[in-house]
Image (cartoon, rainbow, N blue to C red):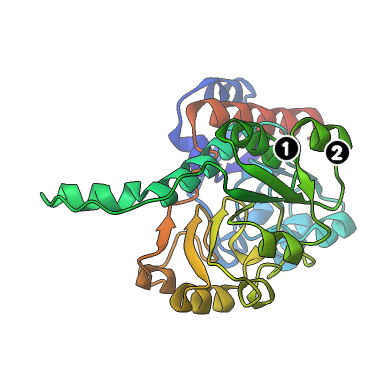
Amino acid sequence: MKILLTSTSFQDTPGEHHHLLEQTGFKIDTLRGPVKEDVLLPIIADYDAVICGDDEYTKKVLEIGKNGKLRLISKYGVGLDKIDLDAAKELEILVFNTPGVNQITVAEHALTLMLTALKNVHTEHNITQKGEWKRLIGNELYEKKVGILGLGKIGKELAKRLSVFGVELFAFDLFFDEDFISEYNITKCSSAQELGQVVDILSINMPLTPETKGIINNNIFNNRDTALVIVNTSRALIVDQDDLYKALGNGKVKFYATDVMDQEPMIKDHKLLDYENVLITPHIGSRTHESVTRQGIAAINNLIKNI
């Protein structure tokens, strides 16, 4: 059995997931993802299965894989937006992901970005590293209206943590857990637009789908009385990128803190780097020893049980 492993978090983090993979006896080849379509096309037919990150499993890649040995894609992580699921189903290639293993660490990262943005932590660090002493004025999280776009596993963990900060919680989701809403005193919104217009801070925790692509846009930014702080630990393209650039420049968006980019790895001259009111981390929201081990083991078990 020949397996392609491309998740860099899996590869870079020591832990039990490595021992479990070794015990399978499979032949393992590695590449450092995210792997583009043109790299996968000439090699994918040689593999029975893959453990992947955000690689480009387009219909063309899947067709070539199916004509070879490819039978299964085990996604390390939750997001499946880089895999053509319709094509995989048509070609009878099994696709699995690892839900329920990274929600705590991603929620912690979202909260970290939120507090960092409000308190100017990253900016002050850069200033003092230069030997300077410039004291900026930040903001409290206390009594802010915080919106959670997507009240799934990650959104719920974030709500739990935010509930002790004395904030007002708002949320939009397609399906609400009424017991959870009641327990944490969350105000339901009827749409993403309503949510984006009533809160001070918006945390994006919703998967990228055709319906959610660009759902945060000028319809929200241009219909607010105050500037919005956005925290994104989900997918970049949930925010309309052109509208975001305009809103960052004209003050409609006060701050954008993101762990995800429309191109990863980020290109060196990315337009977001032109704005001082932007904080970027390189997709590390789930990259902790604890979470990587859980995700790695789950991805391997999906492979073992279904190959």
**x and y, in percent, of residue 46 in the image:** 65, 50
Amino acid marked by disc 1: Lys
In the picture of the structure, the residue carrying the numbered disc 1 is 153
Query: Which residue is nearer to you in this view: 64 or 74?
Result: 74
Identify residue type, mark 2: Asp
Q: Are there few (<14), some (14-19), or many (20+) residues within 10 Å of tag 2?
A: few
Is residue 26 visible to us here? no
Q: Secondary structure at mark 2?
A: loop
Mark 1 burial class by Cα count in 10 Å: few <14, some 14-19, many 20+: some
Q: Is residue 136 above or below residue 181?
A: below
Answer with left or right where residue 38 lies relative to residue 132.
Answer: right
How many angstroms separate mark 2 from mark 1 (CA)?
11 Å
Residue for point 64% across, 41% down: 77
**Percent position of residue 88, x then y:** 81, 56
Do we see residue 165 in this rendering? yes
Q: Residue 159 at what x, y percent from top left?
A: 66, 37
Q: Residue at x 37, y 68 (%)?
A: 273
Q: Which residue is mark 2?
A: 177
Q: Earlier in the sequence, mark 2 or mark 1?
A: 1
| Viewer-side label of 2, 1 | 2
